[in-house]
Image (tube, coloured by chain):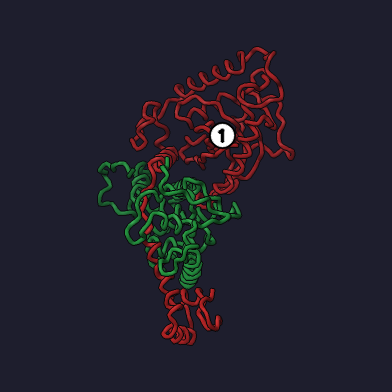
Chain colours: A green, B red
């Protein structure tokens, strides 16, 4: 599975800001091109922040429709990607806040981690558990950690995206990392004892699927 | 979290270790923490754990936007374009194609007429005949009591405030009540009587043509479903707000259409049914039912 091949477009060499300007000026295809350029990353952010594929799909769609229609309001003081990221993150926060609770994990959430994890992780289960642990964080912390630690954005850029001070981003990351480390303790080989080989069972995560089972 | 044997209060909290790495400790606390770490292996191991957590996060597998999600997003974005209104039915598969022609009003009206015929057949008669066998209380497309030219779907004027965030909840309620037969109102094509909700919100005048004319509404539905004749599960006249789109309580038509099994596709559009030059496509959601 991968993205469908992108046809060469008349927008090669047109930067994001120019695309947005063209879109606002009535170019029918410009926004779609902008989306194509960034959709994978925006999807990943929503997926890791929310921990649910259905919710991520909703959030990304809401965000992109809002951005499409609200493009005239882009003031140009930040990068277009920062603007897009901010809208996506806000859509995620809105979704969770209106639900007033983290959504329950649908089984399909694990499908994202079907592919073999890089060697660093050592096992497929590890990615699943990191994702599950992320979901258990307050959304403000998971949003910050997804942007800083998963996507690797500089803290200053993330502060822009989240519209909070740099110090707030740092402390949300620190808190979140401490909580994650706590939750993931059992994955550390030096800490492992027989009891640690039991799968994580929590009230929010489903029974961890047997990795040897076929997934449909 | 403290750990290890010995004086538990001597060990460093996970939060402290995390703060240390992020440069959030005061000079004094930093010095104390580093002094402790120099002599405490379990704490150094805790610090290593936090750092390896960051490595785990960075190593999460990258995943492209799944084709079905991307397809739906591009589909929806394409419909929002004011000048690129709708693909012809034959272009359904080409989600990223440039849609050059606007379906003619005559074409859409023909589809609407076809829909009306479908509705009439489904209900069991034509617009002009009565429906002796149709139960009067069960809502839903196939069994509405005909009031002369009654539509075969429940319509409400809820005046509810939809937003992108609450739309799912509101439309689930709307679509569920429709499929479960507890619709609170039945409209007629000729503007007949309607049971509206408790407080009788006013119907915005710009939405009135869609309310009073079944043909207009079904033409709108045909436009949204790209020429696939479909009867709505439910129709609601309400408002929509969205900060990014600079909309506040904009009059909105909410249409729930049958989606994939177990789902409804819900459109929120303005009075021009997403065909206006000022682009009144507001929101689209695929909502699980039941």
In which quadrant is the C terminus of chain A drawn? top left
Judging from the image, mark 1 belongs to the subunit labelled B
Above or below, comparing residue B286 to residue B31 in the picture: above
**Residue under the image location 51 percent in, 77 percent down:** B4
Above or below, comparing residue B177 to residue B188 in the picture: below
Does dot 1 land on a helix, a strand or a loop?
A: strand
Which image quadrant for residue A26?
A: top left
Residue A33 or residue A214, whichever sits in front: A214
**Percent x, y of residue B253:** 58, 36
Tally the numbered discs: 1
In which quadrant is the N terminus of chain A drawn? top left
**Percent x, y of residue A166:** 46, 71
Above or below, comparing residue B52 to residue B205 in the picture: below
Residue at numbered disc 1: B256
**Residue under the image location 44 percent in, 69 percent down:** A191
Which image quadrant for residue B214?
A: top right
- Within 10 Å of disc 1 (Cα), the crowding (few <14, some 14-19, many 20+) is many
**Percent x, y of residue A105:** 52, 50
Residue A165 or residue B100, whichever sits in front: A165
**Residue under the image location 60 percent in, 32 percent down:** B234
Residue B183 or residue B215, whichever sits in front: B183
**Residue under the image location 65 percent in, 12 percent down:** B129
**Percent x, y of residue B159:** 65, 41
In the visual, does B201 lie left or right of A157?
Answer: right
Q: Is residue A164 visible?
A: no
Residue B165 or residue B162, whichever sits in front: B165
Above or below, comparing residue B134 to residue B75 in the picture: above
């Amino acid at each position: 599975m991968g993205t469908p091949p992108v046809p060469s477009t008349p927008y090669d060499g047109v930067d994001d800001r120019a695309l947005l300007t063209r879109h606002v000026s009535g170019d029918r295809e410009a926004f779609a091109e902008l989306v194509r350029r960034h959709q994978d990353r925006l999807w990943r952010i929503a997926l890791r922040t929310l921990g649910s594929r259905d919710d991520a799909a909703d959030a990304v769609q809401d965000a992109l429709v809002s951005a499409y229609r609200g493009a005239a309001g882009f003031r140009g003081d930040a990068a277009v990607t920062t603007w897009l990221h901010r809208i996506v993150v806000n859509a995620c926060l809105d979704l969770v806040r209106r639900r007033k609770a983290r959504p329950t994990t649908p089984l399909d959430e694990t499908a994202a981690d079907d592919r073999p994890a890089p060697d660093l992780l050592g096992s497929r289960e590890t990615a699943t558990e990191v994702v599950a642990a992320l979901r258990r964080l307050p959304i403000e912390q998971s949003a910050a950690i997804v942007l800083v630690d998963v996507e690797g954005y500089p803290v200053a850029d993330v502060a822009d995206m989240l519209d909070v001070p740099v110090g707030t981003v740092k402390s949300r990351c620190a808190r979140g990392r401490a909580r994650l480390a706590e939750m993931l303790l059992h994955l550390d080989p030096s800490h492992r004892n027989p009891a640690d080989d039991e799968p994580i069972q929590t009230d929010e995560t489903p029974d961890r699927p047997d990795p040897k089972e076929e997934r449909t | 979290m403290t750990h290890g044997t010995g004086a538990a209060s001597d060990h460093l909290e996970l939060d402290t270790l995390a703060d240390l790495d992020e440069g959030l400790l005061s000079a004094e606390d930093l010095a104390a923490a580093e002094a402790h770490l120099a002599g405490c292996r379990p704490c150094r191991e805790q610090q290593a754990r936090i750092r390896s957590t960051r490595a785990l996060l960075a190593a999460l597998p990258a995943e492209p936007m799944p084709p079905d999600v991307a397809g739906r997003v591009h589909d929806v974005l394409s419909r929002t374009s004011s000048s690129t209104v709708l693909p012809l039915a034959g272009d359904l598969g080409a989600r990223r194609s440039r849609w050059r022609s606007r379906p003619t009003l005559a074409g859409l009206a023909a589809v609407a007429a076809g829909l009306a015929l479908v509705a009439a057949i489904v209900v069991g008669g034509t617009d002009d005949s009565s429906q002796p066998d149709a139960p009067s209380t069960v809502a839903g497309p196939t069994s509405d009591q005909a009031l002369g030219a009654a539509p075969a779907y429940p319509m409400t004027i809820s005046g509810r405030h939809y937003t992108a965030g609450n739309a799912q909840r509101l439309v689930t309620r709307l679509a569920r009540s429709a499929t479960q037969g507890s619709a609170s109102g039945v409209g007629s094509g000729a503007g007949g009587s309607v049971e509206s909700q408790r407080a009788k919100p006013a119907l915005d005048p710009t939405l009135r043509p869609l309310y009073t004319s079944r043909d207009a509404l079904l033409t709108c539905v045909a436009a949204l479903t790209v020429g696939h004749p479909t009867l709505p599960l439910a129709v609601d006249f309400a408002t929509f707000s969205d900060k990014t789109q600079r909309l506040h309580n904009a009059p909105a038509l909410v249409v729930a259409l049958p989606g994939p099994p177990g789902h409804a596709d819900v459109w929120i559009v303005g009075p021009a049914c997403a065909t206006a030059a000022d682009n009144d496509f507001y929101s689209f959601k695929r909502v699980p039912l039941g």
